[in-house]
Amino acid sequence: MSHIEDRWWKDVPDPTTKSGKRREKKTGYGKGMRYRVRWIGPGGTEESESFPDGHKRAAENFQKEIDLSLLAGTYVHHRIGEMLFSEHIDEWLKGRSADPVSRDKVKGSVSKHIVPFFVKKYATVAAACTEAGVKDWLAWLSRRGLELSYQAQLYVMLTSIMEAATRARMVPENPCKSKSITPPRPTQSKIIPWPPERAHAIWTHLPPRQRIAVALGAGCGLRIGEISGVSPSDFRRRERVLDVQRQVRWVPGGGVVFSPPKGGKSRVVPVGKAVFDEIDEYMENFEPTVVTLPWRTKDGRPERVEVLMVRRSGLPYYNKAFEASGWHSAFNRAGLVKRLKVDGPHALRHLYASTLLEQGVSINDLAEYLGHHNASVTLKYYAHMMPSSHHRARGAADVVLKTVQSGRPVDLDDDAEAT
């Protein structure tokens, strides 16, 4: 545990006294702080704090606090919490995703909605990481009119930032995990898949060069970036599958790159005959084009891929380029109103998921085809699209009531025959 060192006086042997010791001035007597509390921190390093002459009681009280925190496992370095919160955030950002697009998004969100509040009002880590600070920040976010879903994302980021401070023992506990704070919880709106006639209208009014995106989105469940990176060589016709192994992305600072699919997870997707027929017809009109792009980052190694769908100029599509060059105008030509956050190219992927569930494909298989990390993610978005058991439930409820009414067991099948 800790101990107090007197830097002005020392005990030396003296056989002429009862204790066998006498006090003697040290070389530095009268200079600097007199009392120094010394202890070994959880990391195994020696730490200390000094107090002036006449403040021995303060040194003893400080020593007790250190010993109690070490025993309770709540020790926090008394100086490290004074680190600037902005500096701590910079360190936290270094450990974010290696993916440049994801890292840039996180950095942008933190810079706009976390740093301005805490750095201005709570400069240090110790001051920022409090329940009062988090509650004030949540009220500030609400006043800014941000959507609840975005507030929830920001809360996850702040929780991670403060958890890093807790693990580094800058603060004793993470205030974001306090039961007295209710995190933003947006209402999860259910995905409503397009009806067939809406998908047909967009398919027929897309520019011919972009029309294959419907087959790959609604027929294979690909994201638009993955559609933009598909090569004819990715299809294994004998096995009737597609190897989804790349996408085209726009990276911060400008530039288009090839990169792995979202989450870095390649996958295999079954491909039906209608999709193959559509691809063959498309390639009769538009030859695949060899595209060379850096891999993952602007400075990445060059990657040459024969791409199925490219722009008239030979350049590859990416999300915004695809939407701007034909997707938006297809709604106008079809006489449809394009709904915000509902009618993007991702709607084709939702149509794919809803159709597969309707046809009895398991949620685990669908998760694999969509490239989700696990089935719980798929369930979160598409559970309400699974085939309903309402008919069976109604029959079972009738059996319960008739059993009560008749006073004897009634089988569900017997009841169905009777009706």
Image (cartoon, rainbow, N blue to C red):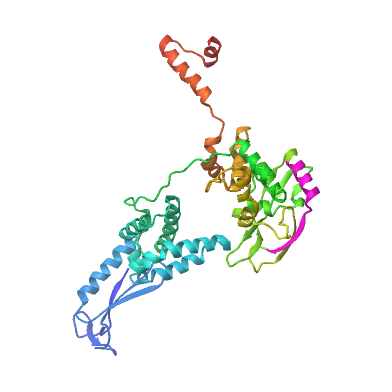
Image coords of residue 247 (percent x, y): 66, 55
253 part of magenta stretch: no
Q: 276 or 365, which is in the foreground? A: 276
Q: Establish if 309 lies above or below 385.
A: below
In the rendered view, does 295 fall on the left or right side of 5? right
In the rendered view, does 15 fall on the left or right side of 301? left
Q: Residue furthest bottom?
A: 27
Splitting the image into 4 quarters, where does residue 239 fall?
Answer: top right
In the rendered view, does 409 fall on the left or right side of 70? right
Image coords of residue 274 (percent x, y): 74, 38
Q: Residue at x 53, y 9 (%)?
A: 418
Splitting the image into 4 quarters, where does residue 405 fall?
Answer: top left
Q: Residue at x 43, y 44 (%)?
A: 187
Q: Establish if 245 lies above or below 66.
A: above
Tally of numbered tags: 0
Q: 151 or 180, which is in the foreground? A: 151
Splitting the image into 4 quarters, where does residue 1 fall?
Answer: bottom left
Region of the chain picked out in magenta, as a range? 275-294
- Residue 231 is at least partly visible in this image: yes
